[in-house]
Amino acid sequence: MRLHRLALFLGAPVLSLSGCVSTSARRPAGEVESMVQERAGARLSAVESDTSIQNATSELLKQPLSPESAVQLALLNNPSFRGRVAELGIAQAALAQAALLENPKVHASLRFPRGGEGRQTGSEIGGTINFLDLITLPLRRKLASTQLEQAKYRLGHETLELATEVKAAYYHLQATRQTLELRRFALEGLEAASILSERQRKAGNISKLDEASQQAAYQEAKLEVGRAEVEEVAARERFAALIGAQAGPWTIADKLAEPPAVEPVLEKIETTALSQRWDLAAARREPSVLKQALRVNRLSMFSSIDVGIDSERELDGVTGVGPEVEMSVPLFDRKQASSAKLKAQLRQSQSTLAGLETQIRLQTRIAHAQLVQTRAAISSYQTKLLPLKRRIVAETLKNYNYMLLGVYQLLESKRAEIEAQSAYIDTLKSYWVHWAELERAAGGRLPQDALQPAPAEKQEEQPEQPSRPEQPQPGHEHHEEKP
């Protein structure tokens, strides 16, 4: 009977004050998935099984990857990111632990008469619970709940960071492949020029200097192709690592897309960034977390305050029942060191928050300025430089056909056109990388109200892939005797 009453005494506070919190991360994961879907346009599968991930991966790989589907593939298969997703489960488990009370303590003892005198034995039984644990329970739950919110925001921010990396790697791979193709075009023309110069030199039509110049240009072009091939391999491997090397065979679109007919408005993008950046939201909650931790720290000065009930039967058979209290005395350790640490961390978090807001404004302005500049450069390439280069090639070809210019001048004009096209591809790649960086700075996809129509410019001619160099014909050349 006494044990029954003791169990009721110890269990009632536990049942009334401690709630049941699940350790499953499914609910917070679902909230993060909704956030990511809205901001990044990708589905974050935080608690999916391996089978469902494999099925989703197979479905994505049926078509050439776009930047968006590449991001989706990375969210499913990038091993480093999948490890960070597990941190959400850690935070959820910490919340569940914060909702639990310490187990009650039970003690019992027997006392026997010395020398065998008498037949009665003494006994004592009692139990206690940590009353301080009961007092701090609401504070600990609130603290863990705020930390779970921070974990969700951090995971959302890391999702956008990965999305930016994947998109940048995607655009870089496209650019390296287009550049490699151009380098190979140029090499074909210079190889033909090299062969022709050797024949002309043997025939005595050009000097040794002219022949050496053509041979050197050909060797330089071979080196450029080699460098372009290495860059393409490196870009492909970086991209494969980001989307998950185990994902399977994949392909991407051949060419970089042209810029859209809209451009972002800086003021609206900056306002959007300050209102929706997830890393900023997590940083804004850090002072609150530390203030809550300070309150818990002050109450935990006593370490424990155990209260309970004790029943004792003396050797003479008399039984006594009464309350029991045991507590630590904060004589030496009054948590002053940990309190000072938390206060310093609080000041640090407030300064970090102010610095992050400044950094976000800076990131937004830099990314926007880079985007505007590269768009202007693209327009200049499309409307001025590339049409001029093509016109030069066309006019040089006319003069070559009329035998007013030599084949080497024609090949040089074609090489200059290819170089301009290569620079255009690099600029176009930079534009899309800056767009991805601006999305990261803004905290997600750019909202429609932050976009405005791009200024319309009359384009003389759309940029085209240069045609393959004309193979110079040995019979169609100027014969000029050289020493």
Image: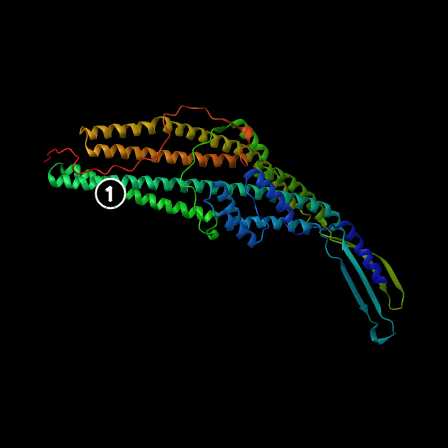
Q: Quadrant of the N terminus?
A: bottom right
Residue 274 drawn at (x, y percent): 57, 32
Residue 119 drawn at (x, y percent): 87, 74
Mark 1 = which residue? 219
Mark 1 secondary-structure assignment: helix
User: Does 112 appear above or below 413?
Assistant: below
User: Does 451 appear above or below 180?
Assistant: above
Q: Quadrant of the C terminus?
A: top left
- State the residue at coordinates (80%, 53%): 12
Question: Who is closer to the viewer here, 34 or 301?
Answer: 34
Instruction: Indicate the amino acid at tag 1.
Output: Gln
- State the residue at coordinates (85%, 57%): 322
Q: Name the residue at the bottom extreme.
A: 116
User: Does residue 381 appear anywhere in the picture?
Assistant: yes
* The quarter of the displayed image where residue 177 is located: top left
Residue 81 drawn at (x, y percent): 53, 48
- State the residue at coordinates (24%, 34%): 412
Question: Who is closer to the viewer here, 183 or 121?
Answer: 183
Question: Who is closer to the viewer here, 385 or 127?
Answer: 385
User: Does residue 324 appear anywhere in the picture?
Assistant: no
Q: Is residue 251 left or right of residue 116?
A: left
Label 1 crowd bin: few (<14), some (14–19), many (20+), radius 10 Å: some
Residue 253 drawn at (x, y percent): 43, 41
